[in-house]
Image: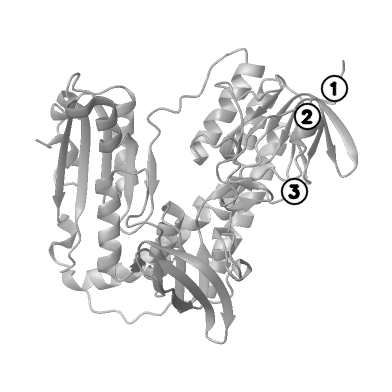
């Protein structure tokens, strides 16, 4: 049967863009459909604009730190509108850049949302299009809690478009998005309260990372409300009133803020995609208490095998909609591995082992490999840990009580480094390099045999004893 395209991609985010361009480079006829800006969550409403805001938020601390080094005190002011306008302009520039990349690669861009009709057919604006293979790369979207007044809150998408900087922001959530925005807004001068359901942020990260960031956030002046859950949001003259319950208390409490950011999780963006018509199976969560997005909860995902193939042999899925590891470089890697396998005569899978990640909080944190707790679950007492916690040299003159933590988790049986974790300035840049060693199977002896760069924070990883 003759098809309109060799490959039709639904979603022009990181995974879809990578796959479409790689497939086209092998001579495939490719089209990609996107109803939003081109670039996906990371470029449009995620890591790129967020990192720009992280940079902006650090200047207030630098002005203070400079005094200890002999610089005069700076009386500065911050222009919220100037920042959000600059961020939006950069997003639009990147959107056009990705469109240009598609054109250069020979990929046809269809600026609309596509819906599956059957295993080989999609519909776009009433037009039926056939393809030999279909790739779903629709990403995810933030969910809101199932409580009254949730419409008065914003998600991470809305944070980049607030018309005014909130004087007091309440952030609900304990994951990296919640933590990062709490630190960003605090650095920009807002009063920030972070409401979490347990007593610790960043579930899944190493405990030393979790405590290192949380302790620093509290020390910096962020109000962390632990063991609490929002029950209701109300619009009042002072802003938005949040009614919440606290573990161990019979009565409910309230807090009022100018804005409320909800960052409790993300669900795959599968609404009206037509998965059922094409026979594509999903992992579906039946728990009615889970927050949902168009019927899909944060635990939902498109079911795929190691080659990103769905239950239909010619339909594939990559990125956040498969809920494997929801990171941009992972989606890109999955997309390229798919294209190499299906169009490049190079069958391969993308490895999800030892993927490094970072939290762009203040202080910053990064990890690669497994946590100490995960290692002990697997190996018990055979696990060895090496850690150091110290005041960084930069703060010798600032007077700030800042701490850096570096940590290695080691298999005592083989001496292999299973995980590396850091809390402190430039953690992501440092762990990126260490990730190569961990991925290659380096041992603690290999680290010990490496000469450090002095004086630097990174050298601590090769001097741990």
**Residue 134: percent from left, percent from top:** 73, 28
Which of disc 1 and disc 2 is earlier in sequence? 1
Q: Residues within 10 Å of mark 3 (few under 14, many from 20)?
A: some
Pick out the residue farthest to the bottom. 237
The part of the image, by quadrant, that contains residue 128 is top right
Q: Which residue is mark 3?
A: 35
Q: Earlier in the sequence, mark 1 or mark 3?
A: 1
Residue in view at x 41 percent, y 80 percent: 77
* Rendered position, 168 above or below 327: below
Tell me residue 422's x, y (percent).
Answer: 26, 45
Please state the horizontal and vertical placement of residue 253, each as a whole percent of the image: 42, 75
**Residue 279 x %, y %:** 75, 27
Q: Nearer the viewer, residue 272 or 92?
A: 272
In-image side of 407 versus 370 (left or right)? left
Establish if 298 lies above or below 325: below
Q: Are marks 2 and 1 in contact (CB under 8 Å)?
A: no
Q: What secondary structure is marked by label 3?
A: loop
**Which quadrant of the figure contains the N terminus?**
top right
């Amino acid at each position: 049967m003759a098809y309109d395209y060799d490959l039709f991609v639904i979603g022009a985010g990181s995974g879809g863009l990578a796959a479409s361009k790689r497939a086209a480079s092998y001579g495939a006829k490719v089209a990609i459909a996107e109803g939003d800006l081109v670039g996906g969550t990371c470029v449009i409403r995620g890591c790129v604009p967020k990192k720009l805001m992280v940079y902006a938020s650090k200047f207030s601390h630098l002005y203070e730190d400079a005094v200890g080094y002999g610089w005069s005190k700076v009386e500065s002011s911050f222009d919220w509108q100037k920042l959000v306008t600059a961020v939006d302009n950069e997003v639009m520039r990147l959107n056009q850049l990705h469109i240009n990349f598609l054109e250069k690669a020979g990929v046809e861009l269809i600026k609309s949302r596509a819906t599956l009709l059957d295993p080989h057919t999609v519909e776009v604006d009433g037009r039926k299009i056939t393809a030999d293979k279909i790739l779903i790369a629709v990403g995810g979207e933030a969910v809101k809690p199932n409580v009254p007044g949730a419409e008065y809150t914003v998600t991470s998408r809305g944070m980049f478009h607030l018309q005014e900087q909130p004087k007091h922001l309440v952030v609900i959530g304990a994951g990296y998005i919640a933590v990062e925005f709490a630190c960003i807004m605090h650095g920009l001068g807002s009063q920030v309260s972070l409401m979490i359901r347990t007593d610790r942020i960043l579930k899944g990260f190493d405990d030393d990372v979790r405590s290192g960031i949380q302790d620093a956030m509290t020390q910096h002046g962020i109000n962390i409300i632990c063991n609490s859950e929002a029950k209701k949001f109300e619009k009042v003259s002072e802003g938005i009133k949040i009614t919440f319950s606290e573990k161990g208390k019979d009565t409910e409490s309230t807090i009022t803020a100018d804005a409320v950011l909800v960052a409790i999780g993300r669900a795959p963006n599968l609404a009206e995609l037509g998965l059922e018509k094409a026979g594509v199976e999903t992992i579906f969560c039946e728990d009615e208490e889970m927050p949902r997005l168009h019927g899909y909860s944060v635990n939902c995902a498109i079911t795929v095998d190691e080659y990103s193939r769905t239950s239909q042999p010619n339909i594939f899925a990559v990125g956040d909609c498969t809920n494997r590891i929801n990171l941009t470089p992972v989606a890109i890697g999955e997309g390229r591995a798919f294209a190499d396998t299906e169009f490049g005569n190079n069958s391969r899978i993308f490895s999800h082992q030892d993927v490094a990640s970072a939290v762009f909080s203040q202080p910053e944190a990064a990890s690669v490999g497994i946590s100490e707790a995960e290692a002990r679950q697997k190996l018990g007492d055979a696990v060895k840990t090496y850690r150091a916690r110290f005041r960084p040299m930069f703060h010798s003159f600032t007077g700030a009580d800042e701490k850096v933590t570096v940590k290695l988790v080691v298999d005592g049986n083989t001496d292999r480094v299973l995980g590396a974790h850091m809390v402190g300035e430039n953690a992501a840049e440092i762990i990126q390099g260490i990730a190569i060693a961990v991925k290659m199977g380096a041992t603690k002896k290999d680290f010990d045999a490496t000469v450090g760069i002095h004086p630097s924070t990174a050298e601590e990883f090769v001097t741990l004893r």
